[in-house]
Image: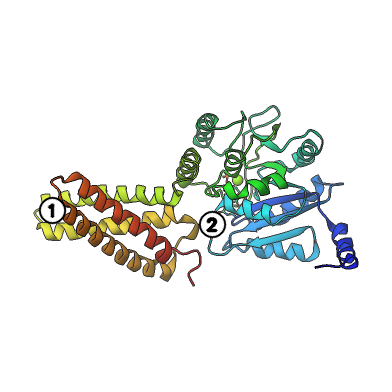
Amino acid sequence: MLTGSETQSQAAPAAAHAAELSVIIPCYNERGNVGPMVAQLAAALGGIAWEAIFVDDDSPDGTSDVARAIAVTDPRVRCIRRIGRRGLSSAVIEGILSSSAKYFAVIDGDRQHDETRLPEMLRMLREDGADVVVASRFADGGDAAGLSSAWRYRLSTVGISLVHKLLPVKLTDPMSGFFAGRRDLFEQTAPSLTGQGFKILLDYLLSTKTPPVVREIGATFRPRVEGESKLSILVIVQFGALLLDKLFHGMVPLRFMSFAGVGFVGLIIHYLVLMLSLSSGITFGLAQTGATLVAMLTNFQLNNAITYRDMKLKGSRLWRGLVEFMLVCGIGAAANIGIARMLYYQNDGVIWPGLLGAAIGLVWNYAVSSTLVWRARRR
Ligand SMILES: Nc1nc2c(ncn2[C@@H]2O[C@H](COP(=O)(O)OP(=O)(O)O)[C@@H](O)[C@H]2O)c(=O)[nH]1
Ligand SMILES: [Mg+2]
């Protein structure tokens, strides 16, 4: 318990630095952008009490070092360095949850978003009763020129039309990565967020208990001048997964869906390799062993790249993980066959024992892989 005088003496210096706006900046390999970003924010946010929180996923280029070096002399700047994890959405969530200002803004760390729109976004939160303000590339005054190619533009528009079927509010740019909001509302919603993938705004808007008051503001999307885009084909997979998760109200874990999807791909690969080997005259036993090994290897790689992307195994841990994965799946396969055989001899059908055996194998593989092979921290 603090006494009255203790609380007072602690409150005074804190109030002197209290920020009204926390600017959350997710970054990965953005070393060259950090300094200019701080300078641009300082220029744009004159007269506003702000702070900048860089959330870096332990970038190999040393983004954190640069941010921390600036923080040494500029108390408005902070840096969160996350180790063993990747993900734009989860980085943003942690950044916002680490702040205590009344309002937050999320802006890319590559200077593609127009930070000069921030004062107006803050004003709309303060004075217009908005809960969320979205900087839109497609609203009046907006521009998507910085989308690097035609397929990126296409992807964005197809994604938006899909999203409109789910969203409680109509927005021209629900996929925007540049938005601002009230921290208290975000804090309330945080436990329901999926936290996977690139689309944190969408995740947020699909997770609030009651539809928030959302306003849009036009903003230009500049081309990148420094660093590289991290967008890959995986982003589309993650986008689909986010929508599925929200459709099922989070009841089926996303990882499980992904693991099962990879398992299905493995089955197809197994079948193809088996057929190919048999047609080239290899004995069944050898063909089956080869097909099993190939399927396990591809499943392991796919799971490492997609299902457990945020805790990807690399280097020596990759090899150790592979051996563990093969052992786990070996036991899963034995359980699968054992149960299916037992049921097969008790009943007449083939389909149900087969499916049940496979389902039990899948759940076993998933549960044990998640706890043994891919753990958040493996040191
Ligand atoms: N912390 C963190 N930031 C990320 C990650 N992936 C992308 N970012 C940052 O998120 C912002 C948007 O990413 P970017 O690759 O520019 O996406 P694009 O503009 O759609 O091509 C940039 O500031 C990236 O550095 C990640 O896994 N973790
Ligand atoms: Mg970018």
Residue 186 located left or right of residue 348: right
Q: Amino acid at mark 1?
A: Tyr
- State the residue in front, 181 or 234: 181
Looking at the rendered structure, which numbered label has been put on residue 234? none
Read off the residue under disc 1: 345
- State the residue in front, 39 or 322: 322
Q: Residue 367: x, y in percent?
A: 39, 59
- How crowded pointer 1 is (Cα within 10 Å; few <14, some 14-19, many 20+) is rated as few
Q: Is residue 158 above or below residue 377?
A: above
Task: Determine if the C-beta at disc 2 is less than 8 A from ligand 1.
Answer: yes
Ligand 2, by image quadrant, is top right
Q: Is residue 189 above or below residue 2?
A: above
Q: Residue 93: x, y in percent?
A: 62, 51
Q: Residue 324: x, y in percent?
A: 34, 68
Q: Secondary structure at mark 1?
A: helix
Q: Is residue 159 visible?
A: yes
Residue for point 34% across, 64% down: 325
Q: How many marks?
A: 2
Q: Is residue 80 above or below residue 220?
A: below
Residue for point 26% across, 50% down: 356
Residue for point 48% across, 60% down: 311
Residue furthest to the bottom in view is 379
Residue for point 57% across, 51% down: 88
